[in-house]
Image (spheres, grey):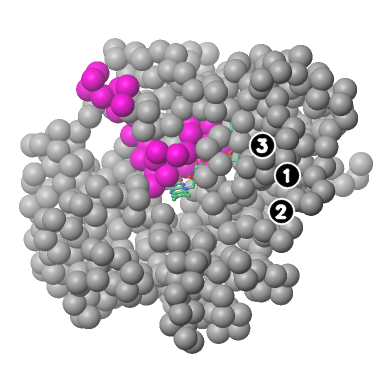
């Protein structure tokens, strides 16, 4: 297998900047940094490897690497935990991969103004272990909690499982230090102060530097919100005999007005069928269980208790059967494992169990549109299951998304198992078709292709200009203005088009 390489003189310059033991050009280091957990076109792996990997330890080193990349017109790709599901950290045009894992320090904990300042390479698990003795936590709680890192959370504009109570990444990052595509180092947040939360001076640029998938710069430090650790976590799960009833109950719980609601989740019939055939906790559930609704509340004990009581009333009155304390508490506690689904699935025609990797969508869909979108998505999954035989439908869930007001749009995800060993050009095209169609349904329903992962994977990315309309043209203008040589993560979001006239 041939892998692209950099001229020795460029590698020498990288060594000068980062140090000999922080620059890698060997095949193992390169291949490992090309890998992502989303289904991967293994048959064309070598076209996505970096040419060199660097592990810098400071913003100044990153700035020098980026300046070098501009001089030599070599792409730069930032990578944090490598858990992104839209190929953001995959080097589509080769180049220098900047792995930020060594920049994992906690620089300041301010318990008075309630901030913590960290490097981009730290994960939430480690950060919260350090914060716990102080009585605080950083409440970004994705299913990838132990393995995604702050830099990647910002690069994707991540979504948190307890975001309805505490907000998502864009609400939790107060300010950031960013190395721009030309190598300048800036701080962006709210006004001049790193810890200030509000400012109306000038353009509101913080969100521009979030969710850009590494196309507008590299975050080298972030100042984040601290919240008091909740005294009480309450979680409850109910089964329903009909999806329709479960959907109505989800809406009622989400709109019940309790500020302690951290999230409400609705699992559909296909998801329950999938869990019942493969998952220890769900196998014993009766055949009549066709949908599950789950709720979590966080806060001071005297705030959580009244909401918990009312939610139990709503669950019962809406026809839900409470699944019991054990599964309600244990399933919620296992949320960081639960969503990494087992790596096997079944061939529909034969029932044969085969190794499968996990593919998921993460559209933002209005509550009112969930039933219709669900039907259309399953039809798309059925089409590729029937046609290619290497896919499996693992069901759909919808999760409250609005920060501090858990109604409106939901993070809606359909999970599809893929027998990756059997991928070839033909059935890969089937997968790309399905991704495009799933994205089309999200847009046609008035939603977004992505609530948190980003939408730069094959298939879905074709529809981003359609989703954004005129705003996509502005995006191209910004990209070209900030990155005149198109060196920051080129190939993402079809942004190479911004340079076409060159
Ligand atoms: C099992 C599982 C569960 C998941 N659950 C969730 C979930 O609940 N919520 C959710 O939001 N996501 C979830 N994800 C997706 C993924 O974890 C998130 O997208 C996460 O934010 C990616 O972080 P990372 O550190 O792995 O970043 P990477 O994958 O390394 O990078 C992601 C993007 O950010 C860019 N980037 C990396 N570092 C920087 C930096 N320092 N500056 C600028 N850009 C940078 C990269 O170039 C890339 O485009 C899940 C993934 C898995 C595998």
Q: Which residue lies furthest to the bottom in this view?
A: 349
Q: Nearer the N terminus, badge 2 or badge 3?
A: 3
Real-space Cα distance between discs 1 and 3? 10 Å
Magenta region includes residue 137: yes
Real-space Cα distance between discs 1 and 2? 7 Å
Q: Mark 1 points at which residue?
A: 49
Q: Can residue 370 be seen in this view?
A: no
Residue 271, horizontal then vertical, whole percent: 36, 70
Q: Is residue 232 visible?
A: yes
Q: Residue furthest right?
A: 502
Tag 2, which secondary structure?
helix
Please, is residue 114 above or below residue 452 in the view?
Answer: above
Q: Residues within 10 Å of mark 2 (few under 14, many from 20)?
A: some
Q: Name the residue under label 3.
A: 29
Relative placement, left or right, of 106 versus 1 is: left
Question: Which residue is located at x 66 percent, y 37 percent?
Answer: 29
Question: Which residue is located at x 8 percent, y 46 percent?
Answer: 306
Residue 290, horizontal then vertical, whole percent: 27, 76
Q: Quadrant of the C terminus?
A: top right
Q: How crowded is mark 1: few (under 14 residues within 10 Å), some or many (20 or more)?
A: many
Q: Which of 367 and 278 is in front in this view?
A: 278
The answer to the question of whether label 1 and label 2 lie on touching residues, with beta carbons closer than 8 A, is yes
């Amino acid at each position: 297998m041939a892998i692209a390489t950099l001229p020795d003189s460029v590698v020498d310059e990288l060594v000068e900047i980062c140090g000999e033991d922080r620059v890698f050009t060997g095949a193992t280091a390169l291949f490992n940094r090309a890998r992502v957990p989303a289904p991967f076109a293994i048959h064309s792996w070598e076209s996505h490897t970096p040419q060199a990997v660097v592990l810098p330890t400071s913003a100044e080193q990153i700035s020098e690497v980026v300046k070098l990349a501009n001089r030599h017109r070599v792409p730069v790709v930032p990578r944090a935990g490598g858990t992104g599901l839209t190929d953001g950290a995959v080097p589509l045009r080769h180049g220098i991969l900047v792995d930020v894992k060594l920049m994992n320090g906690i620089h300041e904990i301010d318990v008075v103004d309630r901030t913590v300042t960290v490097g981009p390479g730290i994960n939430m698990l480690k950060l919260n272990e350090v914060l716990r003795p102080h009585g605080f936590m950083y409440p970004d709680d994705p299913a990838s909690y132990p393995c995604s890192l702050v830099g990647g959370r910002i690069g994707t504009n991540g979504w948190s499982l307890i975001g309805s109570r505490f907000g998502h990444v864009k609400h939790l990052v107060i300010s950031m230090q960013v190395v721009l595509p030309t190598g300048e180092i800036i701080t962006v947040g709210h006004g001049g102060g790193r810890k200030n939360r509000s400012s109306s001076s000038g353009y509101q640029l913080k969100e521009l530097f979030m969710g850009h998938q590494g196309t507008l710069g590299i975050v080298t430090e972030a100042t984040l919100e601290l919240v008091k650790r909740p005294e009480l976590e309450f979680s409850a799960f109910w089964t329903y005999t009909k999806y329709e009833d479960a959907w109505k109950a989800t809406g009622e719980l989400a709109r019940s007005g309790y500020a302690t609601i951290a999230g409400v989740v609705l699992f559909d019939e296909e998801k329950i069928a999938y869990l019942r055939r493969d998952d220890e906790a769900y196998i014993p559930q009766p055949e009549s269980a066709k949908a599950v609704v789950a709720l979590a509340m966080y806060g001071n004990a005297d705030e959580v208790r009244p909401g918990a009581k009312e939610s139990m009333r709503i669950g019962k009155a809406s026809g839900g059967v409470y699944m019991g304390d054990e599964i309600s508490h244990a399933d919620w506690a296992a949320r960081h494992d639960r969503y990494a689904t087992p790596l096997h699935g079944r061939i529909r025609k034969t029932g044969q169990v085969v190794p499968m990797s996990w593919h998921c969508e993460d559209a933002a869909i209005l509550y009112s549109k969930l039933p219709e979108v669900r039907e259309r998505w399953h039809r798309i999954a059925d089409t590729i299951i029937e046609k290619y035989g290497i896919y499996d439908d693992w069901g759909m869930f919808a999760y409250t998304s609005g920060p501090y007001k858990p109604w409106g749009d939901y993070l809606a995800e359909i999970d599809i198992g893929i027998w990756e060993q059997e991928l070839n050009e033909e059935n890969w095209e089937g997968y790309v078709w399905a991704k495009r169609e799933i994205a089309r349904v999200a847009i046609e329903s008035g939603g977004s292709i992505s609530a948190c992962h980003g939408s730069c994977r094959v298939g879905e990315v074709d529809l981003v200009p359609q989703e954004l309309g005129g705003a996509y043209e502005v995006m191209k203008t910004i990209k070209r203005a900030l990155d005149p040589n198109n060196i920051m993560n080129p190939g993402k979001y079809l942004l190479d088009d911004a340079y076409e006239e060159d």
